[in-house]
């Protein structure tokens, strides 16, 4: 034991045997008839795992069978929701800790838990299904692309069944799981003709004010991972559904997600493809998108990764889309540049749109949706633009490339923006050592 204020009370060497003793004691309590589902004991086990982190690995060999037996027992009669939640948190934490240092260990966890999870799904144990989806997502996210075991592909038709999507607690875990399928098994999904099932789920989610963000999560995963030629026949219908929902209910959340999606699409495919697809729905429609969405509402986008996607998408539109620079929509070019500079320099606009105040009563999330979320099964947010560094630098470099294609034109166009935009832009150019011609 240590008494100094500058040193831990218990050293690492002393902690491990003490932790083992604590864990054995806690599991011993769970074996007593009156304490088999004691939520405080299971929470203590979870906290012990969390405190030990990688040091718990050496103790897991005797502990995992105990967790497995406990899971099999409570699955027969899930009567203690808090106990069950901490049990699944403990399992997900063990998986996370082990796979962080040894990703290949995921196959060992699959061997242990997959048969139990199959039983939960087959018996339709509703209380456990959201937890199962989250842990299956962890498994898939720790598996190399193209190496998804066949049992997952056999499970996919069940995941696309409409009945599962009727339960609010399933929605977010299912979207994450389908997104993992998109990232890890896109060729198999296309080969097995399951793409229509994904699009059907997207259509259902995008129509809901509560779950539209989940629909965007799914379609973004599809755009990032499915082959271009596989999605090509569906692009027009996807955009039609997006605009249909926009015209019927224009909430702030929906508008922000739509802007992020358009910008991701411009980055993934091309800004020309974005303009062509939207104008293919209705002539000159992209002009309305520029004026009413990208210029008017850009400042509402929050979140580090989302703002990076949006910045890069707008830069692509400004610098790689002739239709905007010299074509049909060139009158919007200075306004779009001003909006982007404001986006960089001004705080997020937290004002709301009128439709935000008209959420239907039966479209509000249930308590179960929140309570079923596993903190220790969370996945890190994916940055699809990791290769892009500072967006302001990307802007001035892209402007320089654009200017070199038609010397003299760009400075003249920039001069039509307001004085503040020009001053800030000059600061960017000086900071990153870029000159425009």
Image (cartoon, rainbow, N blue to C red):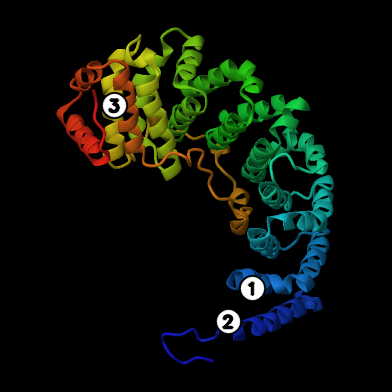
Q: Residue furthest top?
A: 283
Task: Determine the residue positioned at 54% across, 33% down.
Answer: 216
Q: Residue at x 58, y 19 (%)?
A: 235
Label 3 Cα neighbours within 10 Å, binned few <14 / some 14-19 / many ≥20? many
Gap between marks 1 and 2, in whole Å?
Answer: 9 Å
Q: Which SS class for mark 1? A: helix
Between the residue at mark 2 and the residue at mark 3, the CA separation in whole angstroms equals: 56 Å
Position of residue 405 relative to residue 214, above or below, is: above
Residue 110, by quadrant, is: bottom right
Q: Residues within 10 Å of mark 2 (few under 14, many from 20)?
A: few
- Circle nearer the N terminus (1, 3): 1
Secondary structure category for the residue under label 3: helix
What is the number of the mark on residue 12?
2
Q: Residues within 10 Å of mark 1 (few under 14, many from 20)?
A: some
Q: Name the residue: 63% across, 59% down.
A: 100
Q: Are discs 1 and 2 less than 8 Å apart at CB?
A: yes
Residue 337 numbered mark, or none: 3
Q: Secondary structure at mark 2?
A: helix
* The C terminus lies in quadrant: top left
Q: Is residue 408 left or right of residue 259?
A: left
Badge number at residue 352: none
In the image, residue 275 lies at what x, y percent? 45, 16
Residue tagged 1: 55
């Amino acid at each position: 034991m240590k008494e100094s204020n500058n040193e831990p009370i218990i050293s690492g060497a002393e902690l491990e045997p003490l932790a083992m003793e604590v864990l054995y004691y806690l599991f011993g309590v769970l074996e007593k008839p009156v304490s088999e589902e004691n939520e405080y004991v299971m929470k203590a086990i979870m906290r012990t795992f969390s405190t030990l982190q990688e040091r718990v690995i050496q103790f897991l060999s005797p502990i995992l069978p105990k967790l497995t037996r406990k899971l099999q027992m409570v699955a027969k009669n899930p009567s203690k929701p808090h106990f069950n939640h901490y049990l699944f948190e403990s399992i997900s934490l063990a998986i996370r800790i082990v796979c962080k240092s040894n990703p290949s260990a995921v196959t060992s966890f699959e061997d242990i838990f997959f048969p139990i999870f199959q039983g939960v799904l087959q018996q339709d144990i509703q209380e456990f299904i959201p937890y199962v989806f989250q842990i299956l997502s962890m498994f898939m996210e720790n598996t190399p692309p193209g190496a998804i075991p066949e049992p997952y592909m056999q499970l996919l038709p069940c995941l696309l069944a409409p009945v599962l999507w009727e339960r609010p607690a399933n929605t977010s875990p299912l979207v994450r799981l389908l997104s993992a399928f998109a990232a890890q098994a896109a060729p198999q999904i296309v080969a097995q003709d399951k793409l229509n099932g994904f699009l059907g789920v997207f259509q259902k989610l995008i129509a809901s004010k509560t779950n539209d963000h989940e629909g965007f999560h799914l379609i973004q995963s599809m755009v990032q991972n499915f082959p271009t030629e596989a999605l090509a026949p569906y692009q027009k219908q996807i955009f039609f559904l997006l605009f249909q929902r926009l015209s019927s209910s224009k909430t702030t959340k929906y508008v922000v997600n739509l802007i992020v999606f358009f910008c991701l699409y411009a980055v993934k495919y091309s800004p020309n493809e974005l303009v062509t697809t939207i104008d293919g729905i209705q002539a000159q429609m992209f002009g309305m998108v520029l004026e009413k969405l990208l210029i008017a509402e850009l400042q509402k986008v929050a979140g580090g990764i989302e703002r990076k996607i949006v910045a890069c998408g707008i830069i692509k539109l400004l610098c790689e889309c002739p239709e905007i620079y010299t074509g049909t929509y060139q009158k919007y070019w200075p306004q779009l540049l001003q909006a982007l500079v404001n986006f960089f320099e001004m705080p997020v606009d937290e004002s709301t749109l009128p439709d935000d105040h008209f959420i239907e009563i039966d479209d509000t999330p249930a308590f179960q949706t929140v309570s079923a979320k596993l903190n220790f099964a969370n996945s890190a947010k994916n940055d699809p633009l990791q290769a892009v560094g500072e967006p302001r630098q990307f802007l001035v470099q892209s402007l320089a490339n654009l200017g070199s294609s038609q010397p003299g034109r760009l400075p003249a166009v920039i001069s039509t923006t307001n004085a503040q935009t020009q001053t800030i832009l000059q600061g960017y150019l000086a900071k990153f050592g870029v000159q425009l011609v």
